[in-house]
Image: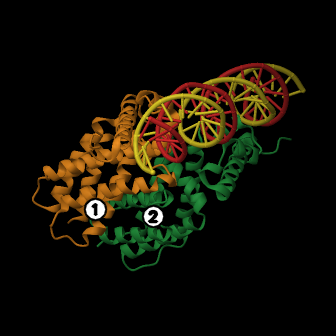
Chain colours: A orange, B green, C yellow, D red
Amino acid sequence: MAQPVAVEGRRARNQAVRRKRVLEAAMALAAAGGYEAVQMRDVAEGADVALGTLYRYFPSKDQLLVAALGEWASTLERRLKQKPPAGATAADRVIDVLRRASRALEREPRVTGAMVTALSSPDPDAAATKNEVYETLRAIISGAIGGAAVDSPDEVVRVLGYVWFAALVSWVGGMAAAGLMADELEVAARLLLR
Amino acid sequence: MAQPVAVEGRRARNQAVRRKRVLEAAMALAAAGGYEAVQMRDVAEGADVALGTLYRYFPSKDQLLVAALGEWASTLERRLKQKPPAGATAADRVIDVLRRASRALEREPRVTGAMVTALSSPDPDAAATKNEVYETLRAIISGAIGGAAVDSPDEVVRVLGYVWFAALVSWVGGMAAAGLMADELEVAARLLLR
DNA sequence: CGCGAAAGTAGAACGAGTTGCAGTTTCTTG
DNA sequence: CAAGAAACTGCAACTCGTTCTACTTTCGCG
């Protein structure tokens, strides 16, 4: 009589649900008050989960927020696959993508701030998760370059990834105004893809 | 009978001494155990200063460490003025400078880690101090380019500054091996200064 | 000199990330 | 269906950055 246990069993499904609830609770808090407002006790309460459980899912606050950023980046990547960037040259397409991304990030400055803060944290336990995020960001840039003939595309992509990250940190750290970020990225893209 | 109060009076001199003691204590702790080992109570004790006094000099741990990085960068800049980088082209000189700097930073990984962690912290109160550090780093790159004819030198310098910062953070965050940092910088310099 | 403000001291107290623990619930599996 | 392991819960406790308080010392200046 056992229902065919769809995929992965009931436990896994419940865990996926919990995980999502946790991430949503964290985002809600981040939207309201940024990094410092994402307090682990509050996240636990908001997700209706015990503090210990929260820590079982995400071993630290930074890993939680980096994971959230990972979801965001994956979503962006998916959307870009469906609606590829416009532009005749590789530089134009890269700039288009980065501007779109920047606009989205700037729309929720506190959320972005929280996630980027976590991304730049030194926590070595989060290194693997952080790398995935970087990987996705690079894939996004790479996709924008597409098949265009570019000198050493991998190197260009890596350098652009660095610039993207640094620009985000500068903005979040209050060292650069919001609009600047996209402009700096455009400058870098034009220099590297000329 | 009053001794001619050299410069700036006795108070200012004592404060300069205290400040230096604090920075030295912080560096000693950082050398031993990195960012987390730089605990404000221990810094205060090591510098033979009360905790409250420490906070009067440096309003936060991050500002303390960023200030330390600022000293390091200024020293490097001074040294480079005396012994300018070797190399025929701008790219070669920039690479030489960045390699020298990287080697120095990699020699004390824990100290570097502590300082870079602070530099990438989002604390907006530290923005001014952080900007000074960036300014110095850019000046160093700029000096290496020197008078060479380069397209949009300011933009190139800014982008290289971003890459330098991001490479440091990657290394410190455990996402890239030590030697890699200098190599990535070389790649970026060659791409931007070709 | 001698006073008053600024700077320093010791130490308690608060907040938030993280950990540990004892007891309960929920799955999976045989 | 009956373990029994793994996952959860609620909560106390610990750490370390930061703040606050009450008191003392030091220095520049009239």
Residue B176: image tag: 2
Amino acid type shown at disc 2: Ala
Numbered disc 2: secondary structure: loop
The quadrant holding residue A134 is: bottom left
Numbered disc 1: secondary structure: loop
Give the residue at x 70% y 51%: B25
In the displayed structure, would residue B93 be above or below residue B1?
A: below
Report, in whole angstroms, how far the alpha carbon at label 2 lies from the one at label 1.
30 Å
Q: Position of residue A110 (x, y in %)?
A: 37, 35
Amino acid type shown at disc 1: Ser
Give the residue at x 66% y 45%: B39
Circles 2 and 1, Cβ within 8 Å, touching? The answer is no
Relative placement, left or right, of A138 versus B74 is: left
Tell me, yes or no, if residue B116 can be seen here. Answer: yes
Say which quadrant the C terminus of chain A sits in: bottom left
Tell me, yes or no, if residue B56 can be seen here. Answer: no
Relative placement, left or right, of A3 versus B166 is: left
Residue B152: image tag: 1
Q: Are marks 2 and 1 on the same chain?
A: yes
Is B44 or D13 nearer to us in this picture?
A: D13
